[in-house]
Image (cartoon, grey):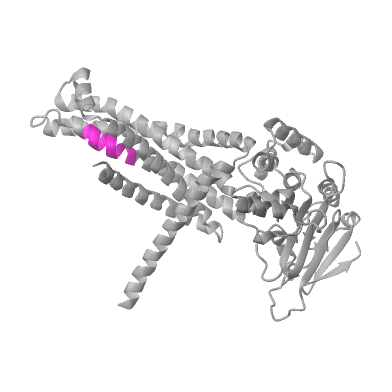
Amino acid sequence: MTAVVAAIGQSGARRLSVLGGLARFALRALAAAGRLSRTGRWVTLRVLINQIRFTALQAVGLVTLLAAILSFLVIAQTSRQLGAVAPNFFGTIMVVAVIRELGPLLTALIVVSRSGTAIAAEMATNRVLGEVTALEAMGIDPYIYLVLPRMLGAIVSVACLMVLFDGVALVSGYIGANVGSGGMSIGHYSDIVLSTLSAKDVWLTVAKGITFGAAVALFCSYHGLAVKAGPTEIPQAVTRGVVGTIVAIFIMSAAFVAIAA
Amino acid sequence: MTPARASYLAKAFTFGVETAPPLVFKDLDLRDRPDHPSHRFNLTIEPGEVMAVVGDEDSGVGDLGSYALGLRRPISGQAVVFGAAIVDLPYYDLLVFRRRLGYLQVGDGLLQNLTLRDNVALPLRFASDHRLAQVEGRVTQLMDDLHLRAVAGLRPAQANEEDRRRTAVARAIALDPDLVVLEAPFDGLTGRAAVDLLEHASRREDGSRRTICLTAQELVPSVRRLLTRVVKVVDGEAVDEAP
């Protein structure tokens, strides 16, 4: 019995220690921004733009496709199943389910699967090849060079992709509503959706963009840089980073619902 | 930076800079033998010296570079750099302090996702206050001096071993440091290339001689001729050899 309690306690303590490590990691990454040299700022901006190109621009196609299909399916089915009982209910579904919840979640999952894995693998490789040591030996804070641009890049990218997702979902939702209800004017569709949208949805999108983006970069960087033994640890670090980010994103989603209720 | 940290940094920079030797190893236990307190490594490297510390693979000579840069804490003893016990400096002060030192780690430590040119520019961009034009000028000069212009756009994996090592040396001296620590810098290089690299590493921007501490398992005669002192690690202790 005591062994079971000890095992549970150890597991809990390990998770708490990871959370503490992540918080310290996040603070160090933020503090690093204040120590950038003049030229370093310019170079970091270049790295940031590259990061946004990879994380956001190259994901535009995938996000557009998934947003269009998801919104079409959800709205078409809602209109078809509930159209007779509540003809305008799809507006609530569009805003509450697609734009407020599923959009940010799906966008963050796309970024984790594409860029989170790349960030974790790159950081782990940097560590294994001694590049982090080389940076420190040159007097360069690895948080400035490695973590900061990726964190800012992920935040900007996730926020932008969420806006794109919402835009595509709204357009695709119109097609879904047309198919489900057997014909609807664009004016009528806009009225229904816009009457359900509120300012809260805008700030929620911004807040989720920042927190989800930061979570992707921080979890993946943290686990990537935690590699010590050698190359065999790299896939494990990637898995830990991605799984940790997914869990964090779902928990944060639930927290947002609780806070914004 | 808080006043306490700033003063600590100022102390680390100024304490003994004029009078203290660039690098002192004090009572290092290189062979992890706490039961043999007499076998301790003591060595002082004076300004302008070009010194080689040689030893077998298991002599502990390979650890000296990381001790000198404060990357690792010795089992016992300490490395004192320009009068400061480097490993005891707070992390951010240590990063700033290291900008006075150049370091070539075993292999080369080049960043694989950067070109050779960008690797050389790295310390100038992130660890100096130079303007971008000054950075580019200095990098171009270094690339020319070390015969890297033709391969500047290659990634480390695309370049040959000699060019990678030249790049690593160029990066180590980019900030014109007072002291350069080179770990096994000539492994796999020809004698001619080794001499060329050592000549560049030991010459400062103003033409004066830079203090060099290099570690190696063995040295070719052409390199020995450029050294002012050679020390061999024998049973954990420093024993002078003829250069």
A248 sits to left or right of B55: left
Residue B104 visible (yes or no): no
Give the residue drawn at x 79%, y 69%. B42
From which residue to which does the magenta span run?
A: A93-105
A154 sits to left or right of A190: right
- B100 or A163, nearer to the observer: B100
Q: Residue furthest front?
A: B3
- A192 or B107, nearer to the observer: A192
Q: Quadrant of the N terminus of chain A?
A: bottom left
- B164 or B133, nearer to the observer: B133
Above/below status of A11 relative to A141: below
x, y percent for residue B5: 62, 53
Q: Determine if the magenta segment contains residue A94.
A: yes
Give the residue drawn at x 44%, y 42%. A114
Above/below status of B83 relative to B99: below
Kindly indicate the quadrant of the structure image that contains residue A61: top left
Q: Quadrant of the C terminus of chain A?
A: top left
Look at the magenta stretch and give its main secondary structure. Answer: helix
x, y percent for residue A117: 46, 47
Give the residue drawn at x 42%, y 56%. A19
Above/below status of B84 relative to A114: below
Question: Total label count?
Answer: 0
Q: Determine if the magenta segment contains residue A64.
A: no
Residue A13 visible (yes or no): yes
B9 sits to left or right of A77: right
B163 sits to left or right of A56: right
x, y percent for residue B230: 86, 62
x, y percent for residue B1: 59, 47
Q: Residue furthest left?
A: A85
